Amino acid sequence: MCRNVCGRTMLKEPTPDCSGAGLPATRCGPAIGGTETAESGEGNGMIVFENSMFAQPEECRPNLKNQMKKFRLFLLSLFFAAACIFYSSCASGTVDLVQYAYPGDRAMWAQIFSLSKPFVLPEGEGAFPRAVIIPHHDITALRQNSFYSALAAKIQPKVVVVLCPDHFESGKNFITVPKKTVFETPDGELSLYKELADELKKSELGKFVCVQDGIWRNEHGIFSHTPFIAHYFAGAKFLPILLKPESCAENAQLYKRLGEFLCKVLPKESLVVASVDFSHYQIPRMTAMHDYVSMNTIANWEDVTNLEVDSPESLTAVTAFAASCGCTMPLLVDRSSTYDYAPDDDVVSTSHQYWAFYSGLGRDAVDSFAKKALLCGQKVNRLRYGEGKNCTLLIAGSGSLGAGVRTFWAWDRYGLEKDEALRSLRDAAGTEARFFKGFDAYVFDPAVKDEPYLALGRVVHGTCLGVWVCPLEKMGLAAGLCASGAFGTSCDAASSGGGASAAGGGASGEFAGKKGKLPCVNILVLQAGGGAGGKAVAKGKELAAGVKVSAKKLLSEYDCVIVRSTDGSFGAWAFARGKGSGSKNTVVEEELGFLCLKDGALGSGAFLAVNWQDGFLQRESFSYQLNDCGLPPRVFQGQGEDEPPKKSVWGFDR
């Protein structure tokens, strides 16, 4: 016996080589072939290999190391080749299978299709929509089913086009369509309308269009709809269209042209679906404020650019399509939010609105629909615009950042804005500036002038909205100001962010022409420029009681009076009137504190959201402590924040 380098005791035994010469077998390890025996020796087992490759002479044995190395290289090459083929096929769009939500769970989808009843929709000849708005939030699956099943009873379209935000910004252009992507559903594959994709690419919009596959698997804005489309519109051609989000205001014209193009090329038996979720990242009481503006704006065919929704682009395209097709009657079929599924005042909420666009519906048909829908629990819109006050404002406290009075708030996405207000209030504006977005007007820090002037005059939702500014020391001039008709040409030039459009030219022609003919919401800002004027109306940082009394008296003429200082010599207050519970007129007051303070001075403030809905007043206050820079931080917007919000004063259903 001998010991090899492994330290094991091995048994020498003659083993024939290829030529018959005997060589000792001194290999350790288990036998690969043949038999093995063991006997004790020096505390280690002794192995004898018979008829195995290890029993062969070394020069006659296969080189296992080389063979294993070659095998590993072969596997690596095979894997690399497969990866290259897969990547190449995905890049070229030849392999892209898009599954639906909860793929393979056909039993669950069968339940979804059967659990909810169809929505109530208008009845009568020709009562079918050409365009609809439906959310893609998966929490709404049963309501989605209710809408699709109701639509299927009215129309069986030959083509269904889904407009959707490009959530992950994977598209290489403003408009993205697939060519070879396969969309799977519980009812089989959808038939892709490739001809429409080709036609869109060849059209005058072609330079803004990208035909692109391999990006659709994660796009929930599309695959949340595909099971319903396949189930309720069997055999219909299907084309999803992604629209680049957060496009600048100038590109709104592009999406309008897209809607008009679709009207020209699609057959009459077509349905265009805007896959849009509404308010995001807000607690329910702010969600409700934003949703009122969205509802009022869509109902009145107004500019949707500033709405707090996830795809103003899709709304622009679908409303342009509907208008071009003569479907000029938008009806709110239902609405909901996360609050309906998780009724918590602090839940971070996403909201949903279901719209259908009709042509030729009379007022009687609409009223009949509304009554039946309400009985079935649908939340519809019964407002008669032009008969009651409807508008929503966001108001800030004392101090000056150059925000002015504006009608639009842009998201300073990359922190590159030259607008000082957008830069300074970037945190306060919230995630994607959604806390600030979605108001009819922003009354922050109007320019200081020696004489009263009209900072903003516009018609919105069938309501004349006027914001008047008067030096505090000339408060006596405010009485009769909004009724005088002397709008003037001097006004606050609100700095950009898209906001100067309505705020930069005094009263619009429409405002001047319709004031007195439509319901009016008149806002008065009594503003002190500091110095003696500020000291005369304040004791320390508190507003003098006499000024409060005088301001409230002006509510006989104005719907809201704001008293503020531009230099932060005292904190701001707001006083408002409107119909409260029981339709009784009521007056409320709210301390706004400071929007900002110089040199990082300590202080607190609040943003006040005020809404008149058919004359009924709702206000929501969102308080904060100024940060070390003397600016408002991100305001409480959901669970996990430091400070809980104040409760609603008058809660509307959310």
Image (tube, rainbow, N blue to C red):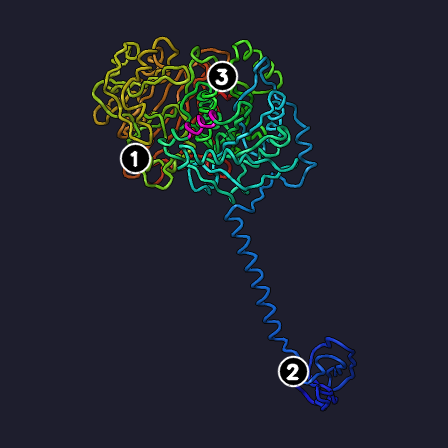
Q: Position of residue 431 (x, y in %)?
A: 43, 37
Q: Can you tell which quarter of the image residue 514 is in?
A: top left
Please name the amino acid that badge 3 sits on: Met
- Residue at point 77%, 84% (across, down): 40
Q: Position of residue 234 (x, y in %)?
A: 63, 30
The residue where tag 2 is placed is 6
Above-or-below relation of 248 to 92: above
Q: Position of residue 339 (x, y in %)?
A: 55, 29
- Residue at point 20%, 21% (across, down): 450
Circle 1: element type: loop
**First reached walking from the N terminus: tag 2 or tag 3:** 2
Relative to residue 591, is residue 178 drawn left or right? right
C-alpha distance separating marks 2 and 3: 89 Å
Please name the amino acid that badge 1 sits on: Asp
Over which residues does the magenta segment extend? 255-264
- Residue at point 38%, 35% (across, down): 411
Q: Is residue 393 magenta?
A: no
Which label lies toward us, 2 or 3?
A: 3
Tag 1 near tag 3, CB within 8 Å:
no
**First reached walking from the N terminus: tag 1 or tag 3:** 3
Mark 2 Cα-neighbour bin, 10 Å: few <14, some 14–19, many ≥20: few
Circle 2: element type: loop
The residue where tag 1 is placed is 419
Overall secondary structure of the magenta stretch?
Answer: helix
Q: Is residue 407 visible?
A: yes
The residue where tag 3 is placed is 329
